[in-house]
Image (cartoon, rainbow, N blue to C red):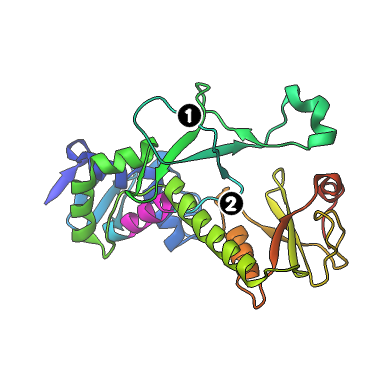
């Protein structure tokens, strides 16, 4: 049975978008499909377990299961630890309740320029093209989010679940990147709390870190004999670095891995953000 593009359901339109099709092809055979663009696909149709893509000069067939997997990977990705922050003073009009999760904007602010030498460049809530703040409310218990992406999946969950069950082994449930970030953040705080309980007294093992937002690099050092001085100390070992975004700007998960690994050691390292007074020195130079 063939379903032409005009007959696709709302759920099928969400899954089988041209970007997801192209990305699924690229992930499967990067050399062969490196130059293929979403705009090259003139139309699509569904033929049993395949997607037929009309490229004008030829037809290209893609397995529906591969595009579903790509769609799921995209929708369930976990952003970088530094992309969001729990914004405790967040307010929202309406009935949404939960943990306020704010997308962060690290771009320079003219208003704060005069204070930057003293305060550094504290991030603020990012806004969309209409100037609306990107602040979302995640309810971890009910697994809901106030964002449009989660609402979109929830509204079409029955059709999406049926499509997933028929053409993949993935169990569908409405989810979004804000929920993924919130759950990762909860796990990190649980580990941090456990680490503090393990080391009731002074802990000399410290993982100090600094995020360079301009280059997307997390700089860090491990010290086994830190000096207790409000974390305003310079560890002796060489700074290391991790690239926390891939070339397309997708979070790699490196920051979460580093923090979880540090907190899971025996005894665990204490996480400490680098003091702003010394961070300016680090920002201007690349570690060896």
Residue 43 in view: no
Question: Image point 61% across, 61% down: which residue?
Answer: 254
| Distance from Cα at disc 1 to Cα at disc 2 | 22 Å
Q: What segment is highlighted magenta in the picture?
A: 66-76
Q: Is mark 2 on a helix, strand or loop?
A: loop
Quadrant into which the C terminus falls: bottom right
Image quadrant assignment for residue 69: bottom left
Among numbered discs 1 and 2, the one appearing first in the sequence: 2
Label 2 crowd bin: few (<14), some (14–19), many (20+), radius 10 Å: some
Q: Could you tell me residue 272's position as x and y percent?
A: 72, 57
Residue 212 in view: yes
Q: Could you tell me residue 255's position as x and y percent?
A: 62, 58
Q: Could you tell me residue 72's position as x and y percent?
A: 36, 54
Magenta span includes 68: yes
The mark closer to the camera, 1 or 2, is: 1
Magenta span includes 147: no
Image quadrant assignment for residue 233: bottom right
Q: Could you tell me residue 138's position as x and y percent?
A: 41, 43
Closer to the camera in the image, 273 or 171: 273
The secondary structure that most of the magenta stretch takes on is helix
| Left or right of 105 in this view: 214 | right
Label 1 crowd bin: few (<14), some (14–19), many (20+), radius 10 Å: few
Query: What residue is disc 2 on?
Result: 81
Closer to the camera in the image, 245 or 228: 228
| Left or right of 205 in this view: 48 | left
Closer to the camera in the image, 15 or 110: 110
**Tally of numbered discs:** 2
Image quadrant assignment for residue 122: top right
Question: Image point 60% across, 72% down: which residue?
Answer: 264
Q: Is mark 1 on a helix, strand or loop?
A: loop
Q: Give the residue at the far bottom of this rendering.
A: 266
Query: What residue is disc 1 on?
Result: 91
């Amino acid at each position: 049975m063939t379903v032409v593009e005009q007959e696709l359901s709302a759920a099928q339109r969400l899954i089988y978008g041209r970007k997801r099709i192209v990305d699924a092809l690229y992930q499967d055979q990067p050399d062969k499909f490196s130059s293929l663009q979403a705009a090259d696909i003139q139309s699509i149709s569904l033929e049993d377990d395949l997607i037929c893509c009309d490229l004008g000069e030829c037809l290209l067939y893609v397995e529906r299961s591969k595009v579903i997997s790509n769609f799921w990977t995209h929708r369930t990705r976990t952003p970088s630890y530094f992309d969001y922050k729990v914004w405790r003073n967040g307010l929202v009009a309406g009935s949404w309740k939960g943990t306020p999760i704010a997308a962060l904007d690290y771009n320079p602010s003219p208003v704060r320029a005069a204070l930057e030498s003293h305060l550094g460049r504290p991030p603020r809530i990012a806004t969309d093209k209409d100037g609306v703040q990107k602040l979302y409310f995640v309810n971890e218990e009910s697994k809901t989010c106030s964002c449009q992406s989660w609402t979109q999946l929830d509204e079409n969950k029955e059709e999406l679940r049926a499509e997933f069950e028929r053409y993949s082994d993935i169990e569908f449930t409405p989810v979004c990147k804000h929920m993924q970030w919130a759950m990762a953040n909860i796990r990190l705080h649980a580990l941090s709390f456990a680490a503090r309980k393990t080391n009731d007294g002074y802990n000399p093992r410290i993982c100090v870190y600094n995020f360079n937002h301009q280059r997307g690099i997390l700089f860090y050092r491990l010290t086994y004999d830190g000096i207790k001085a409000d974390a305003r100390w310079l560890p002796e070992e060489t700074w290391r670095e991790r690239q926390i975004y891939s070339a397309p700007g997708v979070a790699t998960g490196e920051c979460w891995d580093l923090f979880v690994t540090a907190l899971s050691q025996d005894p665990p390292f204490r996480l400490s953000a680098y003091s702003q007074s010394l961070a300016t020195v680090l920002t201007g130079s690349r570690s060896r």
